[in-house]
Amino acid sequence: GLYSIYWSYQNWSLYKKSVGSDVWPIARGIFDILFLHSLCDKISSLISSSQKERSALEWQAIQYVLLVIVSGICDRLAMKELGLPYTHFASFFILPFAYRALYKIQLRINYAMKDDFGEANARFSWANYVWIILGILLCLVTILDGLDSVVI
């Protein structure tokens, strides 16, 4: 969940700088699923998208929001030990599909910012590597915790 907050904050912050808008990137980052559609709409208007492209971008936003909500519901059910181990694994394995939708949105954002290949942010810093390692460890702990509930 932290990545999507950072992703949303970063994109709103860049939008604010490029357009001179008075949006609050922190609030829009924290409540990312509430503001993702607005971000997609603003990006579409920046690149004068056709209706078909706007609809495709909107569909990606809808997919992301729905998948995050379903994943959150499964996570809460697993925490209450309802439907284990299925709800536990479902909450975990839904997320790559949600982040695929964000990836497709990011491609359109990169296009709107005239950085099609994301070259402005193409290199990893030491902090990126630290976060990657922490994320992998968190995923492993989550998987192992789920396996523990299967054995019981």
Image: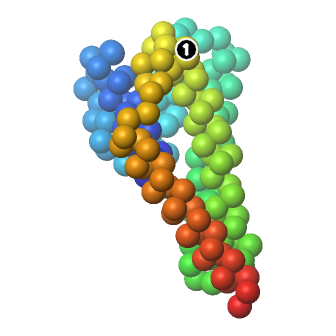
Which residue type does callout 1 highlight? Asp
Residue 44 in sight from this viewpoint: no
Decide if residue 41 is on the left or right side of residue 14: right
Residue 114 drawn at (x, y percent)? 48, 9
Q: Which residue is pictured at 73% across the width and 86% down the height?
A: 151
Q: Is residue 99 above or below residue 56?
A: below
Q: Quadrant of residue 70?
A: bottom right
Query: Residue 139: where, in percent of width, then height?
Result: 57, 61
- For disc 1, the neighbor class at 10 Å (few under 14, some 14 to 19, many from 20) is some
Question: Taking 107 as reference, is 34 left or right?
Answer: left
Q: Which residue is mark 1?
A: 116
113 sits to left or right of 98: left
In percent of the image, x 54 and y 28: which residue is there? 106
Q: Residue at x 44, y 44 (%)?
A: 129
Q: Is residue 64 above or below residue 69?
A: above
Question: Image quadrant of residue 61?
Answer: top right
**Where does residue 81 sit, x and y in percent of width and height?**
63, 84
| Count of marks overlaid on the render | 1
